Amino acid sequence: MADIRKRTGAKGTNYQVRYASPGSPTGYAYATFDTLKEARAFSENLGAMRHAPGGVVLTINDAVDRWLDICEKIGRDGREKVEPTTLVEYRRRAAIIKAYNWPKKLHELVATDVVQFRNWLLTERSRDLARRTLSSFHSVLIEMRRLGYIADDPASGITIRGDGRYEEDGRAVDIPTDAEMRAILAATETLAARNKQFAKAWAKYKPMIFLAVFTGMRPSEYRGLSWANVETDRVHVRQRADKDGRIGPVKSRAGRRTIFIPKSVGEMILAWRDECPASNGDLVFPTATGKPTPLNNFTRRAWEPLLKEAGVVTRRKVRGKLVDMPKYSPYALRHYFASKLIEKGKDLKFIQTAMGHADIQLTLNVYGHLLKDKEAEHAQTAEDLATELIPA
């Protein structure tokens, strides 16, 4: 048996349904609705409608706004507050979520509703943007579940697959070959020896490239690295520089890590210290004016000339003409490092820690295809073990 109570307060009028719930301490549960019609429909068909835990009813827009507020002021699930540039991207995705004509309140959503939303995204937006927006919507639902506004996550297991390329942080995972990497490292020497102007620039860029290759650090992490976190045989990742050059904490607790480096690379970095410009944050790779090196400047002035010098390019049409373009982005150095860890037989947990992934599922999503490539090797290991233990 259920009863409906009209409630009027500072925020207006709503209707609360009280109904029997043997599992609750009082024997009753409550559901709140904006209209009497909704309340009656619920009470007349208990079980056919979903009720809001705690009686708080949110629209999808309400939930998205609360999620954005948490990202900006508190940080999701105990993480640091998101950076301003990240928040801009989140607001963009939030606007897309709100643009959809949601037929239900947050607590009423079921998997079918999320599938319909996914199909709308794929129709109205590019596949990449649809995938990222659905990921943010899933994040909204996870946060609302943690806050007790919904009992489960109706988006669980509903995804948009990429176009066949593996991605991390929205970037396609392209991995250089060993031969290409040797050519890239050799090209740092060639460029540094070209003339005095190049020698001055590459006194910084060469150790920067070597550090990226031998640590797998994100570009934001080595651009934000401070001298206090550099030793001859290791670096401590504690902060990063965002796209606008702001120095802030790493992306997650997992991003705080220590990575061992070859002694020769450590000595190369420390040798650069004598020429390193002064900066407020005592940065390892600042600009001449002491600011964090902008990623676009690094890409244009160092990365693109480096790959062209190394011959690691691809031909593309630009304004009707075929031109040589870098085959990889700077992120390729990170992916190369991860691929070598897998090749050397490091376990998945070690790789997750080294790469600074908060979730081992991300490690699997990005590099799982490389692990699959080792299945034949694992099979042979099993056969070798059987030969040792089982008599012929």
Image (cartoon, rainbow, N blue to C red):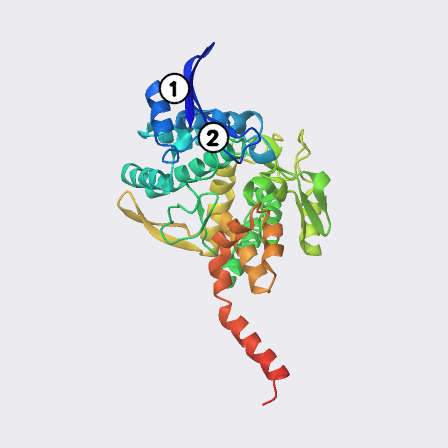
Can residue 79 be seen here? The reply is: no
Foreground residue, 268 or 245?
245
Locate residue 265, reporting x and y percent: 66, 53
Mark earlier in primary sequence (1, 2): 2
Label 1 Cα neighbours within 10 Å, binned few <14 / some 14-19 / many ≥20: few
Locate residue 379, reporting x and y percent: 52, 74
Locate residue 114, reporting x and y percent: 36, 39
Q: Is residue 97 above or below residue 333?
A: above
Locate residue 290, reporting x and y percent: 63, 31
Residue at image mark 2: 20
Foreground residue, 89 or 270?
89
Can residue 217 be seen here? The reply is: yes
> Going by the image, does 306 lie left or right of 263?
left
| Element marked by disc 2 | strand
Foreground residue, 338 or 57?
57
Q: CA distance from mark 1 to mark 2?
A: 21 Å
Residue at image mark 1: 34
Q: Tell me the kind of residue under disc 1.
A: Asp
Name the residue at the top extreme. 10
| Element marked by disc 1 | loop
